[in-house]
Image (cartoon, grey):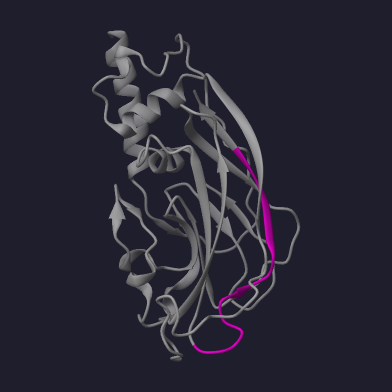
Amino acid sequence: MHFKSYLIASSISVFLIGVMTQFTNCAPADVEFKQAALEAPDFTPLPPDSDLLDGLEPPERVAVLCAQGATTETVTTISFPRPTETCPWNQNGNLQIRNGYFQGRIEQSQAFTLPPQSTLCSLSFDFPEQQFLFDDHFILALNGIVLASSYNYAPMLEKMNNLPVYNWSRIAGTEWITAKEGTYCSGLGSECAWPSTDVPGAIRMKFTPALIQSITALDLNRMQHRFDMITIGDNDDADCEHAPIQFRVRAVYAR
């Protein structure tokens, strides 16, 4: 097979896996979490400006760059402190108190920056022992894409390349249906575990490289990658709170 054809075929295979992204409802369980790894293929790495990359769609380009094996790792600590207030009702797009509806939220952001001309390939998470507590629900997003949530918000959100995009205006005022509560991970093959609302417990998350590469492909020029922690409530003074949470993120990127 011609070298360029081999690269494109390999990238398309990774792309097809990456775009088959959905919320997977994983009940909390003991799972083995391993650092995401990229296998180095037996061909010479290509420079980012190689002519062989010309004409590839962004997901395919990311897959090819990340498959070369010329990758670097960096570790960042992400911290989301306990909010200093509860839901600010009737402010900044929040609604008035209403039992059983998503009326208010608090959003927090933390970011890490990769070197220029970097392509984010995978993320692995290390959560130290800590008692995670949230009230009433939460969403964790990467670059605006929902990674995980304690409620299945995906059906009410718009999609970019089949990835659910966080948008409070699509959630505000919608009914809270108990049957949609759970442990939701974005991406086929992802694994998550955390306690139910208002119950302290451990938290774990694992996302596939294919999912992260699909997010990377949405903006190839992005060097600063942002995590958003959104806590959501309906009707009382304890809503939109969460216990302090901290985790280490190992980012693998190609240059």
Quadrant location, the N terminus: top left
- State the residue at coordinates (74%, 53%): 128
- Which one is nearer the viewer's eye here, 15 or 62? 62
Q: Residue pushed farthest left?
A: 55
Percent coordinates x, y for residue 41 in the rendering: 47, 16
Is 236 contained in the magenta span?
Answer: yes
Residue 73, compared with residue 167, is above or below; it is above
Residue found at x 59% / y 88%? 237
Residue 134 in the image: above or below residue 187: below
| Residue 49 percent coordinates (x, y) | 36, 16
Front residue of this view, candidates 53 and 19: 53
In this view of the protein, which residue sits in the foreground, 92 or 192? Answer: 92
Q: Which residues are magenta?
A: 235-250
Quarter where residue 241 is shown: bottom right
How many numbered discs sit on the rendered protein?
0
Does the magenta-highlighted stretch encompass residue 248? yes
Question: At 42% across and 37% down in the image, what residue appears?
Answer: 213
The image quadrant of residue 85 is bottom right
- The percent position of residue 55, horizontal first and vertical second, equals 23, 23
Q: Is residue 38 above or below residue 43?
A: below
**Left or right, 131 with reference to 35:** right
Vertical side of 169 occupied by 122: above or below = above
